[in-house]
Image (cartoon, grey):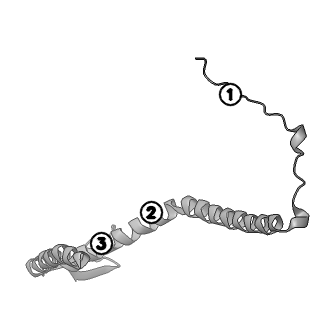
Amino acid sequence: MLRKLVTGFIFVPLAIVFVAFAVANRHSVVVTLDPFDQAHPALAVTVPLFALLLGVAIAGVVLGGAAAWIRQAKWRRAARLAQAQARALASELDRLKQRVGEPSQLPSPVPQSSYQPRLTIAPPAA
């Protein structure tokens, strides 16, 4: 509910601004990609100004998204490797849990008489 409300507060004014911009800039502009002959360009397109600006904005968003996606490739690869390693470790853990659960596979316990503690804690002197 809150998400729809926030979206409404953002997109409704943005849509109003876009419609006002489109109505105010309806006149056509000539877009040419021929820098050598301005009088008779080889490729020229006549489009409304708002359509040109909207197209440039969309192209910028797409190119920026593609650049960010390419830049993040190393992080996606690292995540895939970490996920594969986690799966391998989980399967090894399951295998070791099954092995420990079998009595024939358990290591023999250390005899109690041969155990010598390495550290002793003396009670504080009174």
Quadrant showing the C terminus:
top right
User: Does residue 64 sit above or below 58 in this rendering?
Assistant: above
Mark 2–mark 1 Cα distance, whole angstroms, equals 59 Å
Q: According to the image, label 1 marks what residue? A: 121
Mark 3 touches mark 2? (CB < 8 Å): no
User: Where does residue 89 sit, x and y in percent of width and height?
Assistant: 71, 62
Kind of residue at disc 3: Val
Residue at disc 3, secondary structure:
helix
Residue 68 numbered tag: 2
Q: Secondary structure at mark 2?
A: helix
Of labels 2 and 1, the one closer to you: 1
Identify the mark at residue 77; answer none if there is no mark: none
Q: Which residue is at 27% across, 71% downward?
A: 38
Mark positioned earlier in the residue sequence (3 or 1): 3
Dot placed on the residue nearer the N-terminal end, 3 or 2:
3
**Helix or strand or loop: what does disc 1 sit on?**
loop
Please say whether residue 80 is visible from this viewpoint.
yes
The percent position of residue 11, horizontal first and vertical second, equals: 19, 76
Task: Pick whichever, 20 or 48, lies toward us.
Answer: 20
Q: Nearer the viewer, mark 3 or mark 2?
A: 2
**Which residue corresponds to mark 3?**
56
Disc 3 versus disc 1: nearer the observer? 1
The picture places residue 25, in percent across and down from the top left corner, at 12, 77
- For disc 2, the neighbor class at 10 Å (few under 14, some 14 to 19, many from 20) is few
